[in-house]
Structures are given as C-alpha cells and as structure tokens.
Image (cartoon, coloured by chain):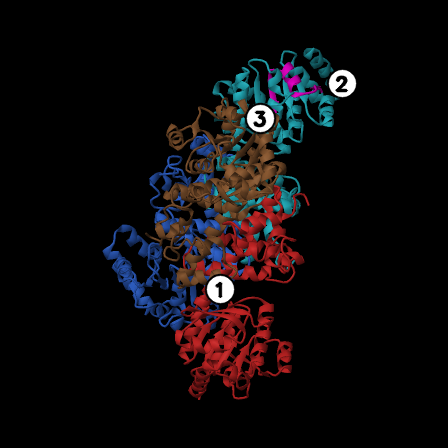
Chain colours: A brown, B red, C cyan, D blue
Amino acid sequence: MAALFRGSRNIWLRWNKHADFAFVSLRSMASKTPVGFIGLGNMGSPMATNLLKNGYPVIATDVFPESCKELQDIGAQVVDSPADVADRADRIITMLPSSPNVIEVYTGPNGILKKVKKGTLLIDSSTIDPAVSKEMAKAAEKMGAVFMDAPVSGGVGAASLAKLTFMVGGLEEEYEAAQELLTCMGANVVYCGQVGTGQAAKICNNMLLAIGMIGTAETMNLGIRLGLDPKLLTKILNMSSGRCWSSDKYNPVPGVMEGVPSSNNYQGGFGTTLMAKDLGLAQNTATNTKTPIPLGSLAHQIYRVMCSRGYANKDFSSIFQFLREEEGQ
Amino acid sequence: MAALFRGSRNIWLRWNKHADFAFVSLRSMASKTPVGFIGLGNMGSPMATNLLKNGYPVIATDVFPESCKELQDIGAQVVDSPADVADRADRIITMLPSSPNVIEVYTGPNGILKKVKKGTLLIDSSTIDPAVSKEMAKAAEKMGAVFMDAPVSGGVGAASLAKLTFMVGGLEEEYEAAQELLTCMGANVVYCGQVGTGQAAKICNNMLLAIGMIGTAETMNLGIRLGLDPKLLTKILNMSSGRCWSSDKYNPVPGVMEGVPSSNNYQGGFGTTLMAKDLGLAQNTATNTKTPIPLGSLAHQIYRVMCSRGYANKDFSSIFQFLREEEGQ
Amino acid sequence: MAALFRGSRNIWLRWNKHADFAFVSLRSMASKTPVGFIGLGNMGSPMATNLLKNGYPVIATDVFPESCKELQDIGAQVVDSPADVADRADRIITMLPSSPNVIEVYTGPNGILKKVKKGTLLIDSSTIDPAVSKEMAKAAEKMGAVFMDAPVSGGVGAASLAKLTFMVGGLEEEYEAAQELLTCMGANVVYCGQVGTGQAAKICNNMLLAIGMIGTAETMNLGIRLGLDPKLLTKILNMSSGRCWSSDKYNPVPGVMEGVPSSNNYQGGFGTTLMAKDLGLAQNTATNTKTPIPLGSLAHQIYRVMCSRGYANKDFSSIFQFLREEEGQ
Amino acid sequence: MAALFRGSRNIWLRWNKHADFAFVSLRSMASKTPVGFIGLGNMGSPMATNLLKNGYPVIATDVFPESCKELQDIGAQVVDSPADVADRADRIITMLPSSPNVIEVYTGPNGILKKVKKGTLLIDSSTIDPAVSKEMAKAAEKMGAVFMDAPVSGGVGAASLAKLTFMVGGLEEEYEAAQELLTCMGANVVYCGQVGTGQAAKICNNMLLAIGMIGTAETMNLGIRLGLDPKLLTKILNMSSGRCWSSDKYNPVPGVMEGVPSSNNYQGGFGTTLMAKDLGLAQNTATNTKTPIPLGSLAHQIYRVMCSRGYANKDFSSIFQFLREEEGQ
C-alpha cells in the first residue's frame, strides 16, 4: 500500500516536471494523499495549516490537546500518537523542540517507527543535533523508511506566510519528494547533502548570526561611548567591511532601524533562550568533531549568562542592552 | 599670511563647485598652494603621489631617505623635518604607523608644532588611539592651528587608485577644506563628528570586521567538518542571517571565491599584525571607556597569538588556516 | 577452573619474580575471588597489575592482543570479551578511553551486561560523561547488577605506584565493597555521592586545573615581558592570592621548578589531547545543564587549537610555550 | 625646622592620646626625619597612621579636606599641595587611585616635582600602569630625586594592622631606605627589580587571582548542578590539582567557608570595580607589550559586565552569584 502511494506520487511528479501550471489545479484536488504532522507548536501549527491550505489532508498529533483542537477546527484529522500518524500517512513531517523529543517521537513506545510503513518519507524540521538526525535516519532505514532533516530559518511570521527557508539533508533521490511538501510551507528549499547536513547548515548559520549580533552590539556600544552617532556609525559599518546582517537588517540599537525588535523594547523576534539552545547544538557538534570555535563558544556562554539574568524571553539583539548599562546603575 | 592662503583656497572652492570640469586644467596649475606630507610608507607614498597628480605641490619628509627620494623623483620637494614642512605648508597630511610616531611628529623637538603657522590645517590619516588625536588637537589649537583625524580604510591598492575611504573627525567648519584634499586620494570621505570620531569609526569597523572574519572562519570550518560543501555553505550563509562582509566579499576558505587572499595562499590583503594593532587600539579605547567588548577582546587575543605562531605577515583571513589544521599534524 | 588458573599463576610468579612477588602470592591466599578487568591500556595495565600484586586473581580482556599478552605473562587469565569476563567474575573494573567505548563494553553485543550475574559490582574508572555513567547504572540495575563510576586523577606513574586518587559515585551501601579493590590501586578514595558524581568531581577538578594552568602561563609570560624574573614572580604569586597548583607544584615555565614537564621540554605528564578531551566533557555537561562556564569554555577552545598546532602530545603546561613565542618568529 | 615640627608634634601626641601613642613617641626619638604622605583615602589614611605610630613625623596632603582633618587630629602636619609636601620632606609616599592622579601629583602645576629636593626618595604605592611608573621615575631623575613603585596587596584591614605586602620596583641601592618605611606599614616587602616591576608583580598577581576566582566560581556552580555537595567539592579540589587561593582561602560559594565575603552576602573584601580596574591595567600592559592573555582578557570583560549589572560594589567573589542564578528568574 505504501509502495502504491509512493508510486503514484512519483508518477505525478514525473508528469509535473513538464507541465507545472497544468497540474496546479489537479494538485489541490481531493486526490492528494494525506500528510502526517507531529508537533503543533508556534511553528508547527502554521506550517501544518499551510499544508491544509495547499489541499493536503493532514493527520496530526501533539502532546497538547489544545494545539490539536485548533488544527482539527480547520480541517486536520487528529490522532492519538506518532505511531497512529505513521499508520495512516506515508509522508510525515515532525516539528519538535529538541533532540530528546525527536528521539521519543521516532523511537519511543508509541513512536513513528512502531508502525511506520515501508517507503514512508519522514521529514524532521526540528533543530537538533545532526548526530541525532543520523541516528534517526539509520533507525528509519531499518524499517524501510526514509528520513530527511529539514530545519528551518525564519520565525513564526515566516511560518504563517509560508516564507520559511528549509535546509534539507538526506538522500538526493528523495529530495524532490520532500521539496513538493516543503514548498507549501517555505519560500526557499536548499538541498545541503547527506543526512544531518540540513542541521549542520542551520547550526552554522545561527552560530555566525550570534557572533555577528554580539559583535555588532559591542561595536555600536563602543562607538557610542566614543562619541559617534549610532545611525551614522551604522551607515559607516554598512558601507565598509564591518557590515553584517545584524548591522544592516536587524540593528540591535534602539532607534537606528524601524520594524526590528530593538525598536520595540526587544519584544518579538528570536528569543535569547532559543539562540542559547542553537549555540548549545553548535558547541556540542564542535566538541564532538574536535573543531575549535572560540568566538562561537564565547557567544554561547554570553547568551547562557543572559538567560539567567532576565533576558531569556527578550529578542537575542537585547545583548546590546545587556552590555550597555552604565556602571553603578 | 596663513589667513590669505586659506582665503584664496576657499574662493577656489566656491568656483570649483559649479564648474568641475572647466577647472580641471586650472586646478593643476602652479597657482595651487603646497601641501605638506609626512610619512611616505606603503600608504603615504601613493597618497602623496595622488596629490601631485592632482596638481598640488607637495612638501614632504620621512625618516627613511629612500622613501623621500622616490617621491622627489616624481616632483615633490623634500625637506628635513616635520618642522620644516610646517614652515612651508599650511595644509599638512600625516600618515604614520602608530601613536608614538604621531606624538613625535607633532610635538617632538623637530615636530610640526615647533614651526606651525596660525590657521594651518593638520590632517592625520594614521590609525591611532582617539585619545591621542584629541591631545594633538589641543596642542595644535594652542598654536592657532586646526587638527583633524582622518584615518582610512582600504589598503595599498586603494591608496594607489585613490579609492580610499576617509573617516574624518574634527571641527565641522573645517571639514570642507579637508575634503578638498582627501577627495584627491579617496573615493569616500565621511564626516564623523568631533575630533577623534574618525579614529573611533575606523576602530569600530575593524573590530567588527575581525569578529566577523574569525566567526566566518570558525563557521566554515565547522560546516566542512560536518559534511557541508564550502561553496554551498557560503551560499546558504549569504542568503541568510549569517551573512557578513567576510562571508560574501572576502571568504577565508581557499577556493570559495576568486581574487581574495584565501585563494592566493593568504598573500596580500590586510596583514594579521595590522589587524592585531587595530584590535589593540579597540581594546585600549574600550578599557579606557570601561566598555565591555567580550568578542572584540577575544578576537584581539586570537590575532595576537597568530602573530607569534607564524601568521604575522599573512592576510588576516588566514585565521581559517590557523583553526583548521587537523590534529596530530 | 578460575581457582586452578589462580593457583598455577601464583606458582609461576613465585618462580619467576623476585621476593616481593613471592611474598605477595603468600599474602593473597587462595580465598580471594577473582576480579574482572577490562581495558589494559597505559592506565589499566598497571592498575590490573596492582590487583594481582594484592593477590586478586584477575580475569582480563582488551581489544589489543599485545596488551592481554603482557598481563597474561604476569598471571592474569585472559578471555575473549567483556561478556566472558562477566561470566567469570562478579567484581569488574573497566578502564576505557571514552564514552562510546564504555557504552560498547557494557551494552554491546559481547558486552558485560549480556552475561552479568546478579549482584555483580561494576566499577568504571574511565573518564566519561556523567550522563553516560547514569545510563550504564540504569542498564546494570535492570540486570540486577550495581554500577559505580570511579574515575581517577594521577597519571601512569601514580597508576604504577598505586597512588591514584579515585572519585567514586554510586550507592553508598556499595561503597565499602568498591573501596576494598580501589585501595589496592590508589592512595585516596573519595566518596562523592550518587552515580555520576565521581565523574562530575573529576571533570570539575580538571576544568579548574586547565583554567589555572593557562592563567598561570599567561601571567608568567606577561610578567617576564614586563621585566620580572620568573622564579621571583613565582615566589610572589605563591605567597599571594594568585597562588594555585599550576604555580606552586607544576610551574609551566622552564627552569622555575625541577622534576616537572616544563623542565623536560614538556615531555611526559598529562598530554594536551587528554586535557582537551576532559574539557570537552566539561563543556558537554555544562551545555546539557545550561551552566555558563566562560573561562572553562575558552580553556577548552585553547587546548583544542593547540592540539591542531603540534602540541597534542606535549604536556598541557606547554601552553606557556604556545603563548610565548615572540612575534615574527 | 623639620626637627622642630617633629618635636612639637610628639609632645602634642603625648598629651592628647592614650598610652600606646605616648610610648610610640618615646620610642621614635627626636632623630627621625619627617615623611611626606600624599593621598589619604581608605588605604592611605591607615598607612599614614602607621607611620605616625612608628614615630615618624608625617607631612600630609589630600584633595579632600576631611581626610586631612582626620590625620591632622592624630598628629600629622597638613599642607596645601604635593609641592608643599616636597618642600618639607625628603621621603614621600603617594597612595592614589589611578594613573592620571599620579601624573598630576608628580608632574602637575603644584606637583611634587615642582619643589622636590635633590636626593628625595619618592615611593608610589598606587596601583597604576608600570609605564607611568617608568615615566615618573625618569621625571624624578631629572630633578635629582629617586622614584620607586611599591604597590600593595591586602585591603583596608591589612593596611590598618600594618600587614600589607609591598612589591617594590626601583634602584636596588635605594631599596633599603624604602624598606625602612614600608616595614612600618606592611608585613612583607618584596624587591622585584627595576622601576615598574613592583606594579608588574601586582598586576600579574591580580590577573591570576581574577582568573582563579572566576574559574572556581564556574567550577563550583557546575559541580553543584551535577549533584555535588559544595563543601565536598571544595575538599576534593583542595586536595587535587584544581586547588587555588580562591578555592582554599576565599571560596566564593556561600556557606562553604566562614569569615569570607561569600558568607556575608559578598559585603566587604575586594570590590568588583577595583578588580575591573586592575584587570584594565593588565589588559593595557599586555596590549602594549603584545602579550596574549586570553583568559585574563576574558576575566576583564566579565568583571566589566558585572560592574554594569549591579555588582560594582560587591566583593569580586560575587561572580559565583552572577553566574549562578537560575534561568527564567
């Protein structure tokens, strides 16, 4: 049965290649086979919603009943456990908070692999340790299923607008099948290589992001103390070699840019705890591969300290505020 | 007499504004008043040459006779000391290696201020501690002269092509006069604020540059160890929030980009010792203003260590090589 | 059968070795029950030898046949696998390089737990992640066995002289039984608390050791550059608040102390790779428990870089040499 | 004239103070020549008092009249300026907050050097940049005077009890003369070498102290999170290679030791701002001598951040509290 599904999808794909537009209307028809979705949090919920919007029947589950209820109200079928999802869908997307959750959802007593069908495509969009992705891929392979890691960049807003970027690792021959679903939820889908490289790309990007953000905050703070106007300094950096995403798109200094968390008391955006989590993953993978990451490691420690000093839920650009406060205050 | 010179220069400027091309030939006539130039090193020499090319008589000096000889051969008048320069020119540019040299050249026994004329415009393009710039400005003011700091970004190549960027600090009413000369040597001239802010802007930019470069090197190294292709990882970073000048314009991984030092065995470019020097300035100004710069400070230490491990004369992007070497080699 | 081996080995010893071994065999008497020993490397081999010297029959195994041969020659019974050891001994000591080896030896296809007898005491002297110790303890408990972690401080010399320090974690009621064996191999045995706390104590000590060593090296280097005599500076630090084990017992500056690796070209002692490994464990446990360790983390990165710059096999006090080299050399 | 002052003051003391002062004045005899003292702050005031107790007439000054009044009440002669002190005493001790104060007091318009007599011994106990000490020594030498740097370790308590440690730099042939005075105020006087080495020793010690303290705090925090009892962990560290002054004499964890600031809500002791200042000096001297100090530099940044997060006036062992707070609190 799974083979049949996979077969039919492949035929559809084969046709689709040469006649994209012709198939748009067919694609949204009721003939689409269901997609499983596990993990209906802040990110997972709008992602699953976008699958529904694209005409895919969704079989969903989550440990929080309220999250399930919401998705059920807009058309998803809710089941009790990951195993139940695996019983009813041969394409499953998971979006979970961390490595232990992924291990549980895949290999736990009611996990996906308990009932997974041969040929099932498993796509994990959680941000986790690439070593865990590889383990899951091996475990899936033993059951005849295919596992791909596809973590995202972009936050809740991008998830709602289907503007996420997916970084995908896994067998190249399965990439096209994954892409079909991921393009319903994201604007960019990038194939990165073997299993785990999606995670690797995500972790690498976020580590460099953290370094750039702290560096920008230090630099702006120093410049202001030396008498420079923050907008002027930003302008100079952005036309020079100091330029980075944190200086030109997400400046951490209140008042320099509009529409970024620094101009909204560091509300919204990407929370410091989330950044600390991603840096923990970078740290672990670096330690495990014996790779020196002096600045990445220090960035991790700084965000870790911030988490314990009241900045846990502020946007990660609040590092400017953390460093800035005058002495004696 | 100085007032007269300054006056005539301003008239020229007023005319020049509305008839750039018409004045090109006039500009290079003998009517231009001479410009002093002190410090004829790798940077100073092409800068002075560009003044000559723009028709300015140049009165020059340097501690190395050979440097003087070269410039003399193309038309400069060489004198014995900074004091002698000050005796003959009321616009003087200095381009020196470090703070002590600047102090000596301005306030030493044969220094500029020994013979400086009232109203003389002193422009220091050295990269030094902004506190020293402020001291020099005060000392110049006592003699009735005006001091501006105008450090550059861009290397020897940019100096030769008159493509430098000048960051200028000093009295706003003198900026225009400085700009006239600086545009002969650079493509961008940015007014930053009071004396010392030119240095501040330069130091800030280079600190963030160092952080971004080390961060990029760490990230690329980690990604490669995790199985990512370096060109692909670069592409992903550059379309994401990890993007920075070191990832998209000056990538430190050999083979990712052409025409950068990493693809030329880290020859040319901006040497590690120079970066270490600028980070030392950042460190000092941060310490003096009690500003925390955790990443900037660590970047300084890393480049300092590199200087003692054989990387002193390689381009500063060689941090990738420094971090990368496999264990046991 | 085990008794037979034991008897014949003792005779062999009596015939082939000098007086103290002859005495040992008398002292030990036939009543002692055999002890299993898995992992006969640089540390494990002298440790197992000390058990033999104390009259314990030893049932041993290792993946390297040569290591087994050596121990067999002095009286141990060698078997094929950890499972075989578990089949013949109800007290087993393991001394392995890292977490994956421990997992394999305990839970692998030929692992201890495949044939472990109820009530067996398992003592792991490897230095590994405390989380793995806890996992092993749980797995052992399921089989009715008792697992304790007992990592050591002290190197090969201390192992040979039975002068190791053991830090022991596990059930307090089993501590006495462990102590009986550990005192044959070490001078100090410290009970630390629940399973994993032995590892925790070891990791904590070594992290602080690394920080103290790098700190001492930086300080001595700076002092020497500022004109202080290294012996005098050492004396001052040791009578003041800068005092630490690395300054007063293991000074990293050649010539300050005798009998330490720094006075022997950094040969012997505790290798940089081993320190990097222990710091990796500290980093992992800190990340997993969300504990900030800014200096520990930077110490880790520094030793990691040293490993790739040719210092892997030098004593960890060679950080002085790494930091010291003059620029331009 | 100086003899006259001395005599009359001693009579005054005998009349106005209790028995031990009366005895002191007898002990001192009329032969002692007066000692100048500039800087009557928390440290300088008890130091000057100890000179008085030892029978030395003291000629003092300070910018704060109240500080002068207090010392005057117990027998010192107060004058208006450092120049006035130099006019009346040929041995002068200075105890000032930072480098700029020292420069002002020695070379300012009313500075010591304006009226210093040939052969005067100048002892500076301030903690400042060794480069400034060298400058002062040169300036003093031009006037025929001798300058020595003699910074102290030990706080206000040690100053009161004459238990300070002095680290002395300067001409060896003048050391004995300095020692005579310093032993009145301290328990240890260590000759370190040429001018500036006293400062160097002080800076080096305090840098290593800061590293050891942060390292101890990180380690204790990590150990506690891993389930270790803090007293037990302290005991283990102190019998092992992790031992340092901060673990065995000044433990930062509340409840581990009595009589240290950590057991008194981090009140008293050595304030975080003072440590940040000393680390700033270490950073500057390291930068100026191109010496890498990765951990010292990070320690500086950490104490700098603490100063701006409300820890400025707490003892520097409060780093434990700074790192410890649980997330989300």
Q: Amino acid at mark 2?
A: Trp
**Numbered disc 1: secondary structure:** helix
Name the residue beneath numbered marker 1: B202
Distance from label 1 to label 3 (Cα)?
Answer: 63 Å
B51 on left or right of A230: right
Q: Does the segment drawn in magenta span residue C76?
A: yes
Q: Which of the chains bears the disc numbered 1?
A: B
In front of the other: B148 or C122: B148
Q: Quadrant of the C terminus of chain B?
A: top right
The magenta span reads: C75-94
Kindly identify which residue carries mark 3. Answer: A2
- Dot 1: within a 10 Å radius of its alpha carbon, few (fewer than 14), some, or many (20 or more) residues? many
- Check residue D89 for magenta coloring: no
Image quarter in which the N terminus of chain B is found:
bottom left
Q: Residue furthest left?
A: D16
Element carrying mark 3 = helix
The amino acid type of the residue labelled 1 equals Lys
